[in-house]
Image: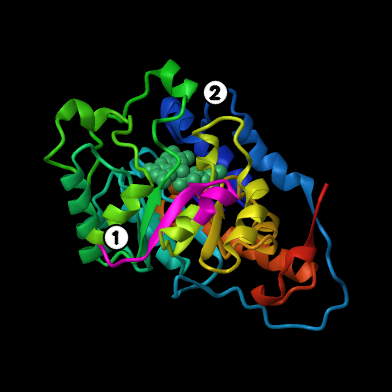
Amino acid sequence: MNKETHVQTINLNDYQTLAQTLIEPAAWDYIMGGSDDEVTLRANRSAFEQIKLRPRMLVNGSARDLRTTVLGTPVSMPILVAPAAHHRLAHPEGECATAQGAGMAHTLMAASTFSTRSLEDIAQAASGPLWFQLYLYHNLELSAAVVQRAEVAGYRAIVLTADLPVLGNREKDVRNNFVLPSHMRLANFPDLIPEPEQNSISIPFAPTWETLDWLKTLTSLPIIVKGILTAEDALLALEQGVSGIIVSNHGGRQLDTALASIEALPEIVEAVAGRCEVYLDSGIRRGTDVLKALALGARAVLIGRPIFWGLAVNGAEGVQDVLEILRAELEQAMVLSGHFSLETIERSLVKFA
Ligand SMILES: Cc1cc2nc3c(=O)[nH]c(=O)nc-3n(C[C@H](O)[C@H](O)[C@H](O)COP(=O)(O)O)c2cc1C
């Protein structure tokens, strides 16, 4: 329950409805929008709805344990915060509030290169573990410096986003002529980027597989590749020695009509065959969605837009509540399907329609 507004927020849909009344319309479109006709954006939801659960009954169990690890880091549940730019669009404290909320839920946040608070400020505000998501700037030295700053600040992995060689065609932003409000900044580059570029949300430099070689010379942190949708690319990522793969279509914001992430997950899990950790994002809104992703082999899931909703409604506590709602839903779905621990969740729990 949000005390100020007296609107009940018992699930993520309620958070979405309330957040829309609190966020500027053009910022709302930027956060919520997808590319082209938003086919993939919708598919991220409909694909989960089409997968059915095969629950087991009369299972003997009591203690429910949702704790797990991601690259060896303990988290209280297999639900993490996805990297997303511009959290200050939803709350004045921006990514610092997000980091506090994630820490209060005892889980991990991945912070975006394009955060509106600096990576150092986020690390200082955080009580939980952090990953750093990397977009490259044309000036590779600047990018290298950011990676090294993240390592110094205590981030535990570098997440290289692979699915953004150019920005997707987000027509809502085109129509709104959306730019980051002038009082917000890409806080990781306070001095070095000229003013007009600070305001732009276009993406500067396309990474390639060779970028991973460059990255490995810069940091000893584990590397995760985000935005993989095929077994072929999962195998190339493994050849590059990555520690993790995030199966993702960027929340339907990049290539429209690309596969829903949950559709891509099985072939990637099969190709990887346990050689690195596999995570999933895009469209997670219910505990049953998390359960389906775990059943299909994801070690954990990440959530993007619902974090903005929690932030807008109630800052760090809103972020915590969004995460706790998903945790409670996952726990209930597990027990209803005969699972008391993450270990017993397996492929036979799901059936594709
Ligand atoms: C407003 C917004 C900004 C985003 N910014 C980034 C970013 O800076 N880096 C990145 O790798 N992904 C970014 N993403 C994608 C998310 O990491 C994630 O893949 C996506 O939001 C998951 O889908 P969901 O919103 O349906 O949970 C962004 C997503 C949104 C909605």
For the residue marked with disc 1, what is the amino acid?
Lys
In three-dimensional space, the C-alpha distance between marks 2 and 1, rounded to whole angstroms, equals 35 Å
90 relative to 211 in the view: left or right: right
Within 8 Å: ligand 1 and the Cβ of disc 2?
no
Give the mark nearer the N terminus: 2 vs 1: 2
Answer whether residue 9 is visible to the viewer in this image. yes
- Image quarter of residue 71: bottom left
Label disc, if present, on residue 216 of the rendered structure: 1
- Image quarter of residue 119: bottom left
Residue at 31% x, 45% y: name it.
115
Residue at 53% x, 54% y: name it.
234
Task: Give the x, y percent position of residue 125.
Answer: 29, 61
* Residue 232 magenta: yes
Residue underneath mark 2: 36
Question: Which of 192/208 is in front?
Answer: 208
Helix or strand or loop: what does disc 1 sit on?
helix
Region of the chain picked out in magenta, as a range: 219-235
- Image quarter of residue 164: top left
Task: Give the x, y percent position of residue 268.
Answer: 60, 55
* Residue 260 magenta: no
